[in-house]
Each structure stands twice: as C-alpha cells, then as structure tokens.
Amino acid sequence: MIVSKHLLGLAGVRREEISIILQTAQFFKEVLNRPIPKVPTLRGKTIVNLFFENSTRTRISFELAEKRLSADSVSFSTTGSSVAKGETLLDTVRNLEAMKIDMVVIRHSASGAPHFLATLIDAGVINAGDGRHEHPTQALLDMMTLLDKFGTLEGLKVAIVGDIAHSRVARSNIHGLRTMGAKVALCGPATLLPREPREAFGNDIEIFTNVDDAIRWADALNVLRLQLERQAGGLLPSIREYANYFGITRRRLEAAKRDLVIMHPGPINRGVELESELADSEFSVILDQVTNGVAVRMAVLYLKSGGDLEVANGAG
Amino acid sequence: MPATAPHIKIKGEIMDAAGLNRTLSRLAHEILESNRGVDNLVVVGIRTRGVQLAERLIEKIESFEGRKLPLGSLDITLYRDDLAYRQRALLSRSKQPRIQATDIPFDLEGKVVILVDDVIYTGRTIRAAMDALMDFGRPAKIRLAVMIDRGHRELPIRPDFVGKEVVTTPGEEVRVQLANVDGVDGVLLVEVTQAQT
C-alpha cells in the first residue's frame, strides 16, 4: 500500500511500501531491456525537476525515468533562472504549480525543502536530495542492487564508510536498510560520524572507526564520496591521511568475505575513498546501481502517480 | 462513508470443464486452418488467464501438428489508459501492486502472433496489448483469440477466433476459471454488486 503521494524520505516508511517499490522497480528494469524501452504509463502527466543544487547523475536518472514512462518533463536549475534574481522557493513553486504540473522532483541544499514544498502544493513531491537530510531514491536503488546480489536484505550486513555525518545518502540508507531487516554499520573518522548514532538510528547500529574491522564484518560496503570541502572545514587533517586510514584498497579486501560487494553513490574520488582499480573490479556494482537508479525512479514516479496494478479479471 | 466490498452472485454456467476443453480444441483447429499450419506462428498470452489458455492452445496444436509453438506472456498494466482514474483512490489503496512479468523470449519481426485472452469486453485491454507488442518488434500479423466475447466494445476491435459469444449486461461479468489458477475449469456468468460491509 502506497500511503502518500510524496516521497520525502525513508524515515517512517513502512517495510511493505519499500518492498512494493523494489518489486515494481524489477518490472521496470525489464522495460529498460526491451527493444523500445518506453511505456505510455505517465502519458499526459507533467513533472518538473527542480534542481537547486548541482547534479548530473540523479537529474539525468530522473529525466530518463520520466521519458521512459512517457511523462512530459521540464528541468530547471538555478543557474540562469529567476532564483538567481532572488525569487524564493515558494514563489518559484507557486508559479510552476499555476502551470498545472502533476509532480515535482526537488533537490535542494536546505534540509526539509521538499517537506516545505509538500505542505504548499497539490502536486506530488519527490525528494532528490535535501541538504544533509535524505536522498531516498538513492537508498532505494542501493537496496535494489543488494537484493539483486544477495536475494534478501534480511540479516545482510552493510557497512557505510565515509562522511556519515553530512551524508543524506547514509541517512536514507540507514533508515531503509534497518526497516528491511539489514544490519547496518557506520565507519569513518570520529569527526565525520554522527554525534549520537545509536540515539538517532537505533541501538543495533554498529560503529567502526577502523575500516579493516568494518571490512571483515560486512557483506557489502557502501563507500561514500568524501566531500573535499570537509578538509577545508578542519574535520580532516588531510585528504591523503583519510585515504590512508579509510580508503578502500584491494590489499584491505584480503580480509573481506569472498562475495563482498562495493557500492558507491558517485561521483567517485578515485584514489581517495576508493582505489581506482577497485571501482572497476569484480567487487564493484557501481554501474548496476546506475541502471537500477532509473528503474527505481520509474517505480517511484509510477506508484506516486496513482499506479495501482490491480487488473480485474475480464476487465476489458 | 461506509466501506464497500464486491459481492458476487453466480447467475449461470456458460461452460463446464469438458466444454472448455472442446472449445480449446476447436480454437486450435481454427488457428491452424487459418494459418495453413504452424509456420511463422507464435503465441502470446495476456496475463494471467490468457497465458494459461495460450499454454493449452500450444499443447493442442502440438498434439495435432507435432510442433511446439513458442509462448510469450504479456502484462499490459503499464499500457493501460486509466491511471488518472485510479489516482482518486490513492490514499485509500489497500491492494498489493500486481504488475507482472512480461516475457517475449523470441523475435516478433515478421511473425504471425496469436494474441490470447480469456474475455474480450471493452477492447481496451487488447488495444493496450497491441501497443505493447509493437514495442517488442513488428509482427507480420496479430490475430486475436479469446475464449469469451461478451460484447460492449468501446473500441473498434474484433477477435479473429472466438470460443463463445455471450450476451451480457454491463453489471454482469464473465469469469473464465482454469484449473491451475482457480482449481477448476469452466466459465461462469456472475453479477458483481457493491455490498455494504
């Protein structure tokens, strides 16, 4: 049962809803492999992609998902828009809504911007990343990739490595994975871990400050992009030191489980959080994540547009 | 507002198990006669019961001709034209999604496709199925085989092979029952009303 037309985050989203999205995404993955990878499902729907922050991967993934579903979509970025002239988010959205849109996909540097939007407009709101808060579709595509590899999330040990404190990807993953029965560990330098992780996410969260311990523990590593500005903020002594202590290398994987999987939300700082060769190795499912991203976003757009898949016997 | 649930009243039996089997044999013969054999023929069933019927037609044809035709299954949910109507029920939805797998494991280019469904009613399912098929390739022909034609067409679509034509009212439904889905073979005429719960 999909209980809301919005997808603002994965905190509080029930296991049943996540399962439905992941199950639906599998069917859309089949659509992506057809000779004509497009269905007329959202024909007549208008979706606006509001990207107040730079993004390549997520924006293109959403745009592609919308086109594959035959929706009309318009993409908007702050550069060259009225936002550059000082227009507020509220004014921007009210203007867009007056143009009769059905759904908004929003990325914003302010945590909570999608929630603010959802209280103001009739259109469905999909969060494509808000500040340090959540990035639900990224977590869903991560879960889909893990399901493809392991067949279940129940009991799966997933270590999230890197800058957890500032990561919306980590936050959505923690909520989603725990809801689906996976075991989650956080690993990173103390300055980049949340202050009270167990208070925030639950007592069963494992914490590692030694990446080798995390690698030995994990079935899958979700390696986060190190935001290089953290060094300027004084949270890291140097990028080289981070790479030495927390960078995932083939040598470190000698202690890993044989079928360990490495994920990364991209873009990768090769040689910093992940050894360049490993990103293209047999451990990596990074390109699977990209493919699954389109399928997951198609599923979210479809289900949040009112997609109900019941077909009565002899209906037509 | 009180919730409602469908109430089903059986109004009559259109076919029993033997009748359904005989009808399938006749349909298989008609398909072979019309195509002058099995050359270039493929069978695609519309999920769920269309696929089951397609499987049985393939078995019949194999018993007559000694050749097993390729089977494809088609889910047309993503091609339906009524998503907007369903949006109204968004917040009260309580059913599990039921997109089902589409599997066409052969090339449709130049083939004669026998599209199989259990009941033809408005014609919208068949329109959606033809749209979906075209996305998989360009068949030479699409021929439509249905077990029951219950009339009330909303689109100008006519099946090529019909098990039985049944006169119905819009309040009635035809239920094709198949042993491996429903536990029993047969065709029923039922009336569905919204019962108060």
Image: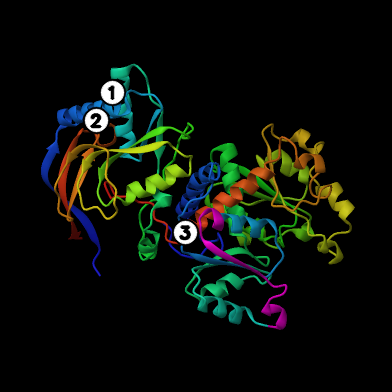
- Residue flagged by tag 1: what amino acid is it? Lys
In three-dimensional space, the C-alpha distance between marks 3 and 2, rounded to whole angstroms, equals 37 Å
In the picture provided, is A149 more to the left or to the right than B74?
A: right
Q: Is residue A297 above or below residue B32?
A: below
**What is the secondary structure assignment of the residue under circle 3?**
loop
- Residue flagged by tag 2: what amino acid is it? Leu
Q: Is residue B60 above or below residue B156?
A: above
**Answer yes or no: do the residues labelled 1 and 2 have beta carbons within 8 Å?**
yes
Q: Which mark is residue B27?
A: 2
Can you tell which quarter of the image residue A74 is in?
A: bottom right
Residue drawn at point x = 59 percent, y = 80 percent: A90
| Residue extent of the magenta highlight | A66-86
Q: Which mark is residue A42?
A: 3
In the picture provided, is A167 more to the left or to the right than B159?
A: right
Q: Is residue A190 above or below residue B121?
A: below
- Residue flagged by tag 3: what amino acid is it? Leu
Q: Which residue lies under the disc numbered 1? A: B60
**What is the secondary structure assignment of the residue under circle 2?**
helix
Q: Residue furthest left?
A: B12
Please state which of residues B150 and B6 is positioned toward the viewer in this rendering. Answer: B150
Asked if both marks, 3 and 2, belong to the same chain, the answer given is no
- Of all chains, the one bearing label 3 is A
Residue B39 is situated, as x and y percent measured from the top left of the image, at: 39, 24
Mark 3 Cα-neighbour bin, 10 Å: few <14, some 14–19, many ≥20 = many
Q: Earlier in the sequence, mark 1 or mark 2?
A: 2
